[in-house]
Amino acid sequence: MSVRMYQNLFNQTKDIIHKEIGLMDETGIILACSDERKIGTIAPLIISDLVWRPNNTAVLESFTYQKVIVRNKMEYIAYIASDDSEGLNYLSLIVINIANMKSYYDDKFDKINFIKNVIMDNILPGDIPLRAKELHLPYNAFRVAFLVKTGKTKDIYAHDIIQGLFPNKARDFIIILDDENTVLIKELKSSEDYKEIEKTANMIIDTINAELMVKATVGIGMVVDSIKELGRSFKEAQMALHVGGIFESDKRVINYNNLGIGRLIYQLPTTLCKLFLKEVFKNGTFDSLDAETVNTVQSFFENNLNVSETSRKLYIHRNTLVYRLEKIQKLTGLDLKTFDDAIVFKVAMLVKKYLDRNDMVI
């Protein structure tokens, strides 16, 4: 774990103890100290012999040293500039705090590695329940995967921001994939906790936008009820980002559960998509539609095929809208004022967008 946590402890206690306190490794390099000028220097006293002593405490030239033992292993040596009983008591309290912090964050790190191996399929399914039990992780609990994608930043990364939003939580895990992709595995109260899911995603987006000044996109997988299924939720979050980037590129939060027709098209063979477009737009008729006409159609769909409402939103006369729709009917044979033809045209537009995104020529 980062020695920054130990330094914070010393900064908080130095005004109470009023004596120099520090932490070093077994070679004597000071890792954290109430006198920050000494960090990185070699301790003036040779303490290597303390490592081999059976007892955990030693007093040398008005300094008291004590080993920090975690799981029967010496991790550090703490010291205080005092050789009296009061100094020893202070040092003992410091050592207890450091040992507890080290133990807690080691457990946390082990749990994060375990969850990462689960979502990346780097662990055998049969080993998952056993490992979860060893780490004291509830195997059956409602959880969901969020995949957060951002652009690269110079100094602060998205995972630092997300970690700050979910600090020290025993059952929420932040997993770093790379500089641009971070996974949040969040435990939920129930499988129907959709408001909490949306709230979490929007909170991540808003915070990253405010603190990093970069755009972020969040893909959300399905809620699962066991650790074993977390890999599926993660892959769904990945697909949500990918499919959403094709069909709903303006959205910042994309839920796998709401991909709709886009998910269906994405899973179709491209050859079938090409045949469908050729059937709907014979002789390349879609390409003959100008941008204004296409925008008109999109607005018409967004307003539930309501001619009056669409013309009002577009600031055009009703007859102008009807003329454009009739023009489309002459070119394609589809009357967009009827539900069935509108559905065919809508799906065809999505299919073309999918193929164009993949740089395929119809």
Image: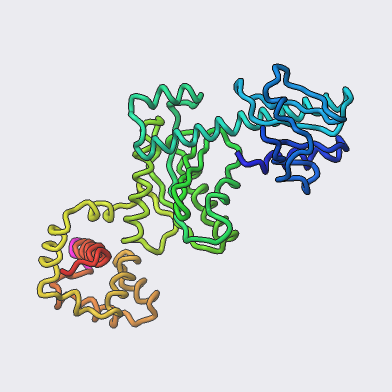
Q: Is residue 345 left or right of residue 100?
A: left
Marks counted in the figure total: 0
| 147 and 353: which is toward the camera | 147
Rendered location of residue 248, percent (x, y): 35, 61
Q: Main secondary structure of the magenta part?
A: helix
| 353 and 117: which is toward the camera | 117
Rendered location of residue 137, percent (x, y): 49, 27
Quadrant position of residue 304: bottom left
Span colored in magenta: 337-341
Q: Quarter of the image containing the C terminus?
A: bottom left
Q: Is residue 41 left or right of residue 192?
A: right
Q: What residue lies at 57% left-to-right and 51% top-to-bottom?
A: 161
Rendered location of residue 254, percent (x, y): 40, 53
- Residue 340 colored in magenta in the image: yes
Q: What residue lies at 59% left-to-right and 60% top-to-bottom?
A: 210
Q: Quarter of the image containing the N terminus?
A: top right
Rendered location of residue 192, percent (x, y): 43, 38
Q: Is residue 59 above or below residue 150?
A: above
Q: Is residue 276 left or right of residue 114?
A: left
Q: Is residue 85 visible?
A: yes
Quadrant position of residue 223: top left
Q: Is residue 218 above or below residue 300?
A: above
| Colour logic | rainbow
Q: Is residue 342 visible?
A: no
Q: What residue lies at 28% left-to-right and 75% top-to-bottom?
A: 294
Q: What residue lies at 60% left-to-right and 22% top-to-bottom?
A: 71
